[in-house]
Amino acid sequence: MTSLDQLKQTSLDKVNALNSLAELEKVRVTLLGKNGEITSELKKLGSLPAEERKDYGQAVNMVKVSVTEALETKKEALEEAALNAKLEAEKLDVTLPAAQLNVGKMHPVSYVIEEVEEILSRLGFSAATGPEVETDFYNFTALNIPEDHPARQDHDTFYLKNLDSEGKRRLLRTQTSNVQIHTMQKFEAPMRVMSIGRVYRNDSDLTHTPQFHQVEGIALDKNLTFGHLKGTLQTFLEEYFERKITMRLRPSYFPFTEPSAEVDIECLFCKGEGCRVCSHTGWLEVLGSGMVHRNVLKSGGVNPDEWQGFAFGAGIERLAMLKYGINDLRLFYESGISFLSHFGKPSTNMKV
Amino acid sequence: MKFSLSWLKEHLNTDLSAEQLAEKMVTLGIEVEGLESEGEQFNHVVVGHIETRVKHEDSDKLGVCKVHVGEKEPRQIVCGAPNARDNLTVAVALDGAVLPGDFVIKPTKIRGVKSNGMICSVRELGFGEEHDGIWELETDYEVGTPLATALGLDDVVFDVSLTPNRGDALCVYGIARDLAAAGAGTLIAPKQLPVKTGQKTVDVKLEHEGCTFFTGQMIEGVENGESPAWLKKRLEQAGLRPINTLADVTNYMLMTYGQPMHAYDADKLKGNITVAPAKGGETLEGLDGNTHELAAGDIAIMDDSGVIGLAGIVGGESTSVDENTKRVFLEVAQFNRSNIAVTGQRLQCNTDARYRFERGIDRAMTVPAALLASELMVELCGGTVSGIDTFGTEKAEQTVIEFNPEKVKTFGGLDIDASEVKALLEKLGYAVTGANVMQVTVPTFAQGMENEADLVEEVLRIKGFDAVPTQLPPLPKVRVKGADKGRNADRVARRTLASLGYIECINYSFINRQKAEMFKGDESLLELSNPLDAEEMSTMRPSLIPSLLDAAVKNIARGEKEIRLGEVGKTYTEKSEVLKAAALMAGKAPKHWQGDVQTSLYDIKAHAMAMLESLGLDPEKMQIYTNEQTGFHPGRSGQLALGKNVFTTFGEVHPALMKQYGLKGNAFMFEVNLTLADTMNMKKGNLFMSPYQASERDFAFLVSEDVNAGDIINTLKGVDKDLVRSVNLFDVYNGEGVKEGFKSVALSMTLQAEDRTLKEDEINKVSEKAVAAVQKRFNAEVR
Ligand SMILES: [Zn+2]
């Protein structure tokens, strides 16, 4: 074995024995640095006879190339090992509980209101608002419910001790229909308006809370008919419940509409077979509706010989209960975090 | 209102079943709340005949019977009754029958012998207590006949509910009339009795304008007592308690024809009768068992003894008929609906008579019903009728409505011929003349029919609302704009609360008075005169804060540890309704392995600012007020405002308020005035974007402890409005190394120009200016 072969062998042995990147650098310097062992062999070239230089030079170079390659390979291996060691050391238990993030929820009434508003808006209804503390006139008289009307007794009205600035008795609105009159007084027909909000009735049991929410729509134009009312309700109900709906209108009575109709839908839970939710009738009452009474138009300053139209109303809580399977009305007003977290929705998850 | 099928069928000739009739009623607007078959417990129980009985091979007591139940072959039924024997008529429960105790009958084997049905005892059928053996029927009905039919228990009772406009259908005859008009049968008209004028044995003076027509009949020589079974059954089916025959007849006639009437014991009457306005203060011992005090103007029925009845509402005890009654004076009259409504409502006296007068009676039915009633009384109690005396005049005029039949299409949406419209109205009892424009005379029984829309409803009702084609109207050409005041702020606030991590709750608008008092400020509160709960729900809330605190207390009591509740709703005072949003952080986040989450004043401040920003406002440009606010910690709360307009109050809940509500630890809350925010239109500044490098300079100042950090920030921002882009306060320190009564505040200022990279000397100049300004304004030392 020549001395060069020996140098090559010992150099490679050194490289192979390396365990760390720091040592690797040191070894690289002892072999290939300015005064390194292999570099020194190259320096010897000058002292060799000319005819030997070429061959020896080539041989030393080969040693240099193979040692350099070995160093590179070793370096990569050591770097990978180092990275693996680092990753191993940095390992975390991802099953540990995450940082606390408070996910807020919107009340079912709030998101159902948004859903309803969105659908009615697409049907051409603009939102309108009105006062909750009202006078007899806007809550009753203007809606064709005079003082001695039997319908007044059905309303269980909350009255206020305080009179208004004109000395008139005040009450909490029993229905959102007061907004109809305010809107008609302020805006000209034709119009399509919806109002949604809190209403109050002095009644409390399993199926009544003294405060609840209503949605109401009114459409006035030259040629709107009872058939258009049916079409609007059918579309509204199908969009809201996101399914095909079998609807039934029954003649009924509301002082502010004529004709008046109660709107039932085939029970969503038993498909009309009869179950607990529909009291075994196969039908669920969801809306009240009708053609706006001419006396109501007059109260709102709209000429009943020129304009006609329809109106409808529903309880928001009822719509929410039917769509989302909430079975106790009173839960809406108990502010229980467990109920609200379960049935509430994050604001980023609205349908609309 | 309840009535039976057999009763209805006395007035309606029909082949329809009870179910079919009920369905028809629904389409006519008569809501059917219940349909109860009398013999329901006898479903699948039939009349059977034991042909033979032989002893069971494996039992001494059991017998094997061959029983005919109307099928081709007799059935084999095993029966243990001692009285089971050949040639006996019995009640047999077949497969599907459900006997009391939810006992379902199905084919079975008893000691190895097939048994296909059950021969029942009286008790097994729930018909009585007898259980000595099987029921031995004595009946002429053929085998196979349903037992209910054999027992005369196959009637069905309808329970219907009528809307206030349907005075016409508040009686069996009225329902029959509506059904007949809709083609569900033919109406059987009541018997027309001849009118014979009476003797005016009792004279009646009408002195109240609320009573214009009054009839009286004297029936002498009656024998009063218990009513016959059929009459008692009818009344019981209607939910009425039978009293005695004379009284029962008046109730029966009311239920049949909708005409209230009253029977007086004529021997108890003192002199003649006067119908006059009450003076007020008189009392009446009513037949309802209550003492009623009359008010001036009530329609009082009086004799020489005083008030003996409240017209159209309730009769008096003193002149009532009883088992000793020999002479009856029968009153059938018409009273004004609004008089009855006002008096009845004041006295909270709900009677069948009042109910019908308030909803309107058939003005043409008074005399015929009076005659039918006296005839029935005589039939059941004997005696003779002297004839009928009438006082005042029967209102005869009928409303005539000018009606364009086209309206059924242009208003009702149903395209039908004028001739069909006419035919339908006539079926309903309207008289129609004319073709293109009809003159329609409203029948005396129809209530509240005034205009064309009413007639359209009648036509649609009879045709069925289902007949109207469903059609979506075209979108409107114009939209109403600007009627939705506050609506957008309401929606934004709800979403923002949820996005900030709050659970939205909705509380009642009325709260405890003391709690409301605290937050009313300079305003007057609104109070309910008839609260549902005089203690806790008496006063309209002037602030959302008491509601949220109450909700927190309730949740903590239920075991919730961390409370983050928000609400959006109105607040109310004498002068105004204001829409607000409020949020509350209370309790403690559960412990976390990374360290517990602490909330502070600065969290709630951030949330209040985020809320304002969501509402389109720029809280950075607002002033911060620190004067004390009700319910808030005086040193840890603030308000964000523009001049007089205060948008929000935020901060820590006052420890005294925490104690009052029984809450522990620290809590933070804000309330935002959405009504105000909605009216504000804060302009956005211009967009700033620069490709040139930004530079930062840090400063530390030593200032007196009471200097507001916010003022230092604003001073720095004001040094050069073109170049100072932002100021970030990154440290406040008053520990070791800082002298007593001082604090060290460290800030970094970012400078950037739109058109160039700032040179070192420019930056230095602004920095020097900044330092000088802070030194001067706050007497600060630079550290
Ligand atoms: Zn159902």
Image: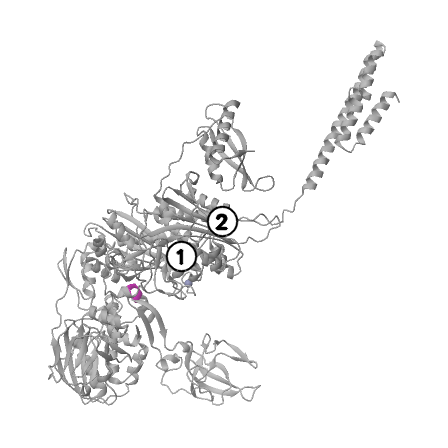
State the mark number for residue B728.
Answer: none
> In the image, what residue type sits under mark 2?
Gly
| Amino acid carrying mark 1 in the image | Met
Q: In the rendering, at what x and y percent does residue B551 appear?
A: 46, 58
Q: Earlier in the sequence, mark 1 or mark 2?
A: 2
Separation of residues labelled 1 and 2 (CA atoms): 28 Å
Q: Are marks 1 and 2 in one subunit?
A: yes
Q: Secondary structure at mark 1?
A: helix
Q: Classify A5 as above or below B328.
A: above
Please tell me which residue lies in front, B701 or B127.
B701
Q: Is mark 1 within 8 Å of ligand 1?
A: no
Quarter of the render that holds ligand 1: bottom left
Is B330 located above or below residue A308 in the figure?
below
Describe the colour scheme in one phrase: one colour
Kindly identify which residue carries mark 2: B501
Q: Which residues are magenta?
A: B25-29
Residue B518, numbered label: 1
Q: Is residue A216 left or right of residue B116?
A: left
* Residue B409 screen position, x and y as percent: 22, 53
